[in-house]
Amino acid sequence: MAIQPIDLQTLFTQVDKIGKEQAAQKDGLAMQQAILGIKMEQKTEAQIQAVNKAQDSGEGAEKVKERKDQKHDHPGSEKDRRENENEEEKAAENEPMVIRDPRLGKTIDISF
């Protein structure tokens, strides 16, 4: 099948339109990739700036376990507590009595 001169005339008039469409397709792909790249960059930046939710530690070794007070575990604990209170009272009695002014430190003297 040979190309006729009339076919060439039709093709030459359409060449500029085809060129523009192909350039638009190439630019469209590049633009689309640029937009996707910007979106991914913004997403990763948001993930970096965001506070992450803590992972559940479960029942592993890193979990803090509460200990029971050893004084309260044995029967003599009430006696030990009373002795400690008595020692604190004696220490408070031995300290000298200090009287403080309630206005102390609340007023400023601005005289020259």
Image (cartoon, rainbow, N blue to C red):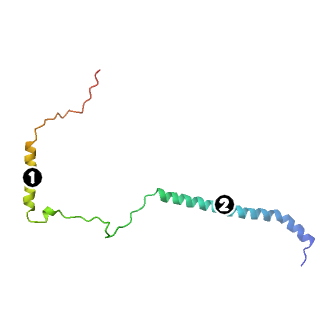
Mark 2 residue element:
helix
In the picture as drawn, the residue positioned furthest to the right comes out as 5
Neighbours of disc 2 within 10 Å: few (<14), some (14-19), many (20+): few
| Residue at (8% x, 42% y) in the render | 94
Give the label on residue 16, or none.
none
Give the number of callouts: 2
Instruction: State the image coordinates of residue 66 (x, y, percent, origin top left).
Output: 24, 64
Residue 48 lies left or right of residue 61; in this view the side is right
Query: In what quadrant of the picture does the N terminus appear?
Result: bottom right
Choose between 83 and 20: the one closer to the eye.
83
Which comes sooner in the sequence, label 2 or label 1?
Answer: 2
Residue type marked 2? Met
Residue position for label 2: 31
| Residue at (7% x, 51% y) in the render | 86
Residue 85 lies left or right of residue 56; in this view the side is left
Choose between 104 and 86: the one closer to the eye.
86
Task: Give the quarter of the image for residue 56.
Answer: bottom left
Residue type marked 1? Glu
* Distance in Å between CA atoms under marks 2 and 1: 79 Å
Give the label on residue 85, or none.
1
Mark 1 residue element:
helix
Instruction: State the image coordinates of residue 14 (x, y, percent, origin top left).
Output: 83, 65
Choose between 98 and 7: the one closer to the eye.
98
Up the image or down, 89 lies above or below 68; here it is above
In the picture as drawn, the residue positioned furthest to the bottom comes out as 1
